[in-house]
């Protein structure tokens, strides 16, 4: 695997993990309401990280 796709894949995976850690901390603090700013932040982090992860894997396979 080349260096750049590997780095992109690692960054994507780290962003996804950070999103899930953030979600776990939100649930630990209390109830999270759908549509609230923390919920949207969590959703965007997980979605963006997944997109970066898929782009890295796609670049590695092409």
Image (cartoon, grey):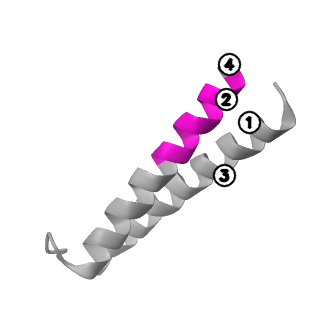
Q: Residue furthest right?
A: 3
Residue on which disc 4 sits: 62
Check contact, mark 2 vs mark 1: CB within 8 A: yes
Foreground label between 2 and 3: 2
State the quadrant of the C terminus.
Answer: top right
Residue on which disc 1 sits: 5
Q: Residue at x 67, y 29 (%)?
A: 59
Q: Residue at x 70, y 26 (%)?
A: 60
Residue on which disc 2 sits: 59
C-alpha span from label 2 to label 4: 5 Å
Residue 6 position in % (x across, y down): 76, 37
Q: Which residues are magenta?
A: 50-60
Assign a secondary structure to mark 4.
loop
State the quadrant of the N terminus.
Answer: top right
Say whether residue 31 is visible. yes
User: Which quadrant of the view contains residue 8?
Assistant: top right
Residue on which disc 3 sits: 11
Which is more N-terminal, label 1 or label 3?
A: 1
Q: Circle 3: is it few (<14), some (14-19), or many (20+) Cα within 10 Å?
A: some
In depth, the one of 58 and 43 nearer the eye is 58
Residue 23 position in % (x across, y down): 36, 65
User: Which quadrant of the view contains residue 7?
Assistant: top right
Which is more N-terminal, label 1 or label 4?
A: 1
Check contact, mark 2 vs mark 4: CB within 8 A: yes
In depth, the one of 52 and 24 nearer the eye is 52
Foreground label between 3 and 1: 1
Q: Is residue 19 magenta?
A: no
């Amino acid at each position: 695997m080349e260096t750049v796709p590997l780095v992109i894949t690692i960054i994507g995976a780290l962003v996804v993990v950070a999103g899930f850690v953030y979600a776990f901390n939100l649930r630990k603090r209390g109830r999270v309401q759908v549509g609230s700013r923390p919920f949207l932040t969590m959703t965007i982090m997980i979605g963006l990280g997944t997109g970066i992860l898929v782009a890295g894997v796609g670049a590695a396979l092409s």
